[in-house]
Image: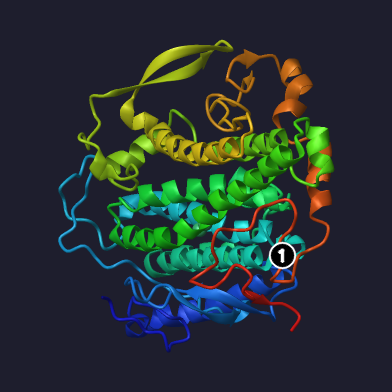
Amino acid sequence: MSDVATGERIPNNVNLAGDKRLQRALEAWQPNYINWWKEMGPVGFQEDDVFLRTAISVDAAGWANFEYTKMPDYRWGIFLADATPNRTIGFGDHIGEPVWQQVPGEHRNALRRLIVTQADTEPASVEQQRLLGQTCPSVYDLRNLFQVNVEEGRHLWAMVYLLHSYFGRDGREEAEALLERRSGDPDKPRILGAFNEPCTDWLSFFMFTFFTDRDGKFQLLALAESAFDPLSRTTRFMLTEEAHHMFVGETGVLRVVDRTSQMMRDHKVEHPDDVRKLGVIDLPTIQRSLNLWYSLSLDLFGGEISSNAAAFFATGLKGRAKEDEYEDHRCLDTAYSMNVVREGRLAQDDVPLRNAMNEVLRDKYVADCQRGVDKWNRTIKANGIDFELTLPSRRFHRHIGIYSDISTDIQGNVISKDEFEAKKSAWLPSVADRAYVQSLMQRPVYDPKQMANWLSAPKQGIKGRPVDFEYVRHGI
Ligand SMILES: [Fe+2]
Ligand SMILES: [Fe+2]
């Protein structure tokens, strides 16, 4: 177990007190961070006691410590997973060489860019979700939202620690800029598209935590393989927190489809208009929300054919998720077969594997998403309803990569732009869909004994507490 300093202004297991310059720099950033949190974090709950998990160390017993905390008092800390003794680079041109404890000069810019891009998503999602507390379906869900929010804040701390420690003045400037960009702001937007999309209803929130946070999981898995050891250790610990975000998304959507399909069964209705009359979200609307957040999240993996991805792999900056599961860690003589677009039509092409690394990571992501969708479908079926949710083709509704120039239907067949526009409302949330979903979420549920009508209660509460536990003491 690593030594943990929890009594310091910034809890950490990196011996911050042993590096006064770094400690001072981070302590100077801290009030700016708190100001950002108060300005851009959850609106209307800053003074409430919330039953939150706080990391106080990285070992199994200490990292999940639950207590009532006011969010601005959350102990955002810097925690690295324990070092692996004699760790060596696991892939690329430098396989077998010792990992780096410092940033090699020639990789400085690329590494900084990787870290800043990851870091930027963390505050962005807090900004996207800042109004959701005011329409929460239950106190249980409200608490989960805030848990996700404070942990995204901690992930920002994790990345800012790397920027301050290893990138000198440039790193400090990047850390400031991370508090200045704003999700959805046309003048100073967040870096990646999905993190500028509005996420203003709870169906979107559950889809976001399932699909968009899951991109985060796979990016972290790939960075956990990095030859830059501090980045590897930082991301390995972030993954333990990310698991809860996956849980919130997967069980959130599950409870929505469970409630809808139960009501369809009990009231013997099928048509979306009749389903809506029961005050629940019809399954086609859930499918359209899924299509939107899945396609936006696929974009986050970057272009299918990428010389940057090839360079990251060759140099050891970024590997594949769970590199251990592969046999060939050099990937020099292998090709990856993919659909490409030639003169507006689909064709098959072999791409050098290193150039296809974004697509390799996307493959693992797609399989992981499918596992969740299968669970949702089992729930629909168990309620006796004949309907299946599906992941659309990965070519559908893309804005990044080789499919961004074409329009496709939901199966990925190329269609004209006009046809796409004409059929779009069957595939993506329409204005009417959004208005309907919003109409269900006009009033928040702040009574711990109650649950909104449009989703089922969770199977169990948090940390052995009952579902109707007072997870947030709001207005008390
Ligand atoms: Fe995160
Ligand atoms: Fe997350």
Residue at (53% x, 29% y) in the render: 401
Q: Is residue 284 above or below residue 58?
A: above
**Could you tell whether 27 is left or right of 356 in the image?**
right
Viewer-proximal residue, 205 or 467? Answer: 467
Residue 100 falls in image quadrant: bottom left
> Quarter of the image containing the N terminus?
bottom left
Q: Is residue 167 visible?
A: yes
**Could you tell whether 6 is left or right of 418 in the image?**
left
- Mark 1, residue position: 133
| Coordinates of residue 303 in the picture (x, y in percent) | 49, 32
Viewer-proximal residue, 374 or 152? Answer: 374
Three-letter code for the amino acid on which mark 1 is drawn:
Gly
> Quarter of the image containing the C terminus?
bottom right
**Could you tell whether 169 is left or right of 265 in the image?**
left
Residue at (35% x, 71% y) in the render: 58
Single out the residue that lies furthest toward the bottom: 7
**Count of numbered marks:** 1
| Coordinates of residue 465 in the picture (x, y in percent) | 54, 73
| Coordinates of residue 13 in the picture (x, y in percent) | 34, 77
Query: Dot 1 lies on which element?
Result: helix
Q: Is residue 89 above or below residue 46?
A: above
Q: Is residue 182 visible?
A: no
Residue at (47% x, 66% y) in the render: 160
| Coordinates of residue 262 in the picture (x, y in percent) | 67, 43
Q: Is residue 232 above or below residue 6?
A: above
**Could you tell whether 403 is left or right of 437 in the image?**
left
Residue at (21% x, 50% y) in the render: 89
